[in-house]
Structures are given as C-alpha cells and as structure tokens.
Image: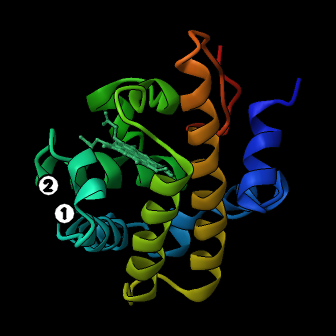
Amino acid sequence: MQSLQDKASEWSGVAAADAFAIDDVNIFESLGGTPQPFVDLSTNFYTRVYGDEEGWFREIFAGSKKEDAIQNQYEFLIQRMGGPPLFSQRRGHPALIGRHRPFLVTHQAAERWLHHMRQALDTTASIDEDSKTKMMNFFRHTAYFLVAGNEMTRQGQGVACKHATSKPAE
Ligand code: HEM
C-alpha cells in the first residue's frame, strides 16, 4: 500500500527531501530570531483566507475566529521552523492530521490554501527568497499529506508524521 508520505510527494510534486529542507537550516534564527516574520505571514495568509471570494473555502474556517487562527498558525510555524515550542506549550502536540479531521481537506481545498499561502509569501517582505522556497515546498507537501491523511482518518486509522516535528512521533 502506498504510504501517506508517498501520496503527499506524488500529489504535491514535491519530494520529501525538498519538503524537509526546512530542517537544513534554522529558519527561525536566519529570519532574525523573532516571531515577527511568522506573525506577518500568518496575518497576511488568514486575511486572504477570511476575505476569500470563494465562499466554499471561506466556510471551512467559519468555526474559528481569525485572530485565533492567526495565533495558532504562527505559533506552529515558529515551533516547526526552529523557534521556541509555543504551539505545544499552549495547544499540545500538533497532531496535524487529527486536528484537520473535522474539515474536508480535499485536493481542491489544498490548492486554494496553497494559492493564498503563495500570495501571502510573495507579499511578506520580512522573509528572504531562499526561506520562501523552502517554506513553500514544505507547505505543498504538508497540504497533500493532510489530504491523504484526511481520506485515511475518514476510514478510521491513526498516523505518526514528520510534518509537525523533526523528531519521530512516539
Ligand atoms: C488549523 C484548514 C492546510 C496547519 C486549521 C483550521 C482549518 C484548517 C479550518 C482551523 C483554524 C484554527 O482554529 O486554527 C486547512 C485546510 C488545509 C490546511 C483546508 C488545506 C490543505 C494546512 C497546512 C498546515 C496547516 C499545509 C501546515 C503546514 C494548521 C495548524 C492549525 C490549522 C497548525 C492550528 C490547529 C490548532 O491550533 O488546533 N486548518 N488547513 N494547515 N492548520 Fe490547517
């Protein structure tokens, strides 16, 4: 059976080695070691998501307040990109597939999510080009990992992953 990682690579077109190139350097430190670039990116991204002209996509986020979604995301990104474990301290283990279980994470939703993230990255001046490339590969691979995981959890199985932490899950 094809693994979730393999599906993520096939569907996203991003090899696992490129997706996890975010671990080759400490991106948090290389961007100055402050939360600001991640706050900028998450605010930019969710402003696009909550203002999306595509109602079907906006609706997926209707259960969360924009401010909360922004904080959840930048704390996760800071943690995953080499900074302090803000997300886990406040929310617990990232468990991304489990946390996305309530939402219909389809191929179409992944493409819309990535469309907004591409635009948000393109218009966030506090992130350099090399980091943007690495982050976009990670986002693309993770988005399709979530699509594959969403299909699987709907069939009632669990999974451990490397998208939320550089250490293997217990
Ligand atoms: C949360 C949808 C992709 C990371 C959420 C939420 C929704 C959502 C509706 C709830 C908002 C909140 O309350 O925080 C989607 C959809 C995706 C997608 C439709 C399309 C593929 C991703 C990707 C990542 C990610 C690629 C990481 C790289 C997160 C994180 C949270 C979150 C960290 C916060 C979870 C929490 O604090 O409980 N997502 N997401 N998502 N998403 Fe996604």
Q: Ligand 1, what quadrant?
A: top left
Q: Quadrant of the C terminus?
A: top right
Say left or right for 19 vs 88. right
Residue displayed at 78% across by 62% down? 13
Disc 1 on helix, strand or loop? helix
**Disc sitting over residue 66 in the figure:** 2
Instruction: Indicate the quadrant where residue 12 lies.
Output: bottom right
Q: Is residue 76 visible?
A: yes
Q: Indicate the amino acid at tag 1.
A: Tyr
Q: Distance of mark 1 from mark 2, alpha carbons? A: 7 Å
The residue mark sitting in front, 1 or 2, is: 1
Residue 69 position within the rendered picture, expressed as x and y whole percent measured from the top left: 22, 49
**Label 1 packing within 10 angstroms: few (<14), some (14-19), many (20+):** some
Residue 53 position within the rendered picture, expressed as x and y whole percent measured from the top left: 22, 73
Residue displayed at 36% across by 23% down? 92
Say left or right for 15 vs 37. right
- Residue marked by disc 1: 50
Residue displayed at 36% across by 34% down? 103
Residue contact at pointers 1 and 2, CB within 8 angstroms: yes
Q: Indicate the amino acid at tag 2.
A: Lys
